[in-house]
Amino acid sequence: MLESDKGEVILSLSGQSKLVTLANDGKLKDFIDFSPFISRPLHITKSGKILVGICEEISYKLSENSVRQIIIIEASGKKLHTFEFDGDHKRILTYALKATTNINNDLYVIDKTSKDKHGRLLSLAYPNKVMWTYTGNTTINSKLQFKPNSLAVTVTGNIVLLDSDTKVLHILDTRGALKTFVSLLNVHVLSPESMCIDGQERLWISCGGLSSDSYMTYFTNIFQGMLVVMSFTGF
């Protein structure tokens, strides 16, 4: 779900190829159809361009016929660019979950790579270059593999990654190096699922669903459905 600069909400219908807009009067209107592929809106830039993830099926298995793309379109629906293969014709993406850009229009994508939802963060540059890849930290992820679930960018350009299994925020610089990290368990956020940073630089974290750590299941039930708002400094 995204909101355009015109106040329209852009939605993808689960498992379908179509994006629709939800106007202020509550009416749905067809926006763009990517048939026969499944689409999901990922991000809208400050200039109004929309990043859409495309796949032939919701699966982490790849074949020669797989289609895993990020398409950049204008608000009118006109296609501007597609990320799919790099300069050596190697596939860039497995399954694009989330994406964002910073003030310099650097593109960051959470790419899920396994059925267990392990993944990586990719930094992409035009026309088809992978600038760097972040796959977690050996200390933070010594027991639980890196499972990025959401991301945001601060006004200083740092990247905040939510690692849902470890309940840790990884803070990266623009080159993909870990600057610091924050354990959400220390601030009693026990079941983080997604997050965003608002215009006042406050971090919003949604909680819900059961943790893969059975020890946390009881506590997760208490926090299910909560929204946590946090202020932060230092990154």
Image (spheres, grey):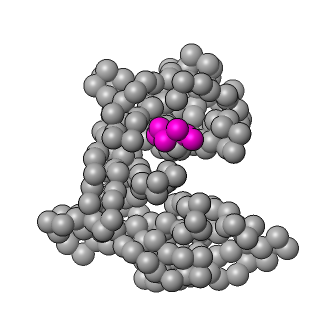
Q: Residue at x 43, y 71 (%)?
A: 71
Question: Residue 156: within the magenta?
Answer: yes
Find residue 65 and report its image quarter. Answer: bottom left
Q: Main secondary structure of the magenta part?
A: loop
Above/below status of 211 relative to 29? above
In depth, the one of 60 and 185 nearer the eye is 185
Residue 206 visible: no
Q: Quadrant of the N terminus?
A: bottom right
Q: Residue furthest left?
A: 88
Where residue 228 sits: x, y (%)?
A: 69, 32
Image x and y of residue 138, in percent? 28, 25
206 relative position to 106: left or right: right
Whether residue 177 sits left or right of residue 229 in the image: it is left
Residue 6 seen: yes
Q: Residue at x 39, y 75 (%)?
A: 81
Q: Which residue is rendered at x = 36% and y = 46% of the image? A: 121
Residue drawn at point x = 59 percent, y = 25 percent: 233
Would you identify the image quadrant in which residue 47 lies?
bottom right
From the top left corner, tell me how far across and down residue 173 is, in percent. Answer: 40, 36
In the image, 226 versus 75, the foreground residue is 75
For residue 173, above or below residue 189: below
Rendered view: 153 above or below 46: above
Q: Is residue 85 magenta?
A: no
Q: Residue 120: image x %, image y %?
A: 34, 45
Outermost residue, top direction? 186
| Residue 234, placed above or below residue 68 | above
Residue range in magenta is 154-159
The total of numbered circles placed on residues is 0
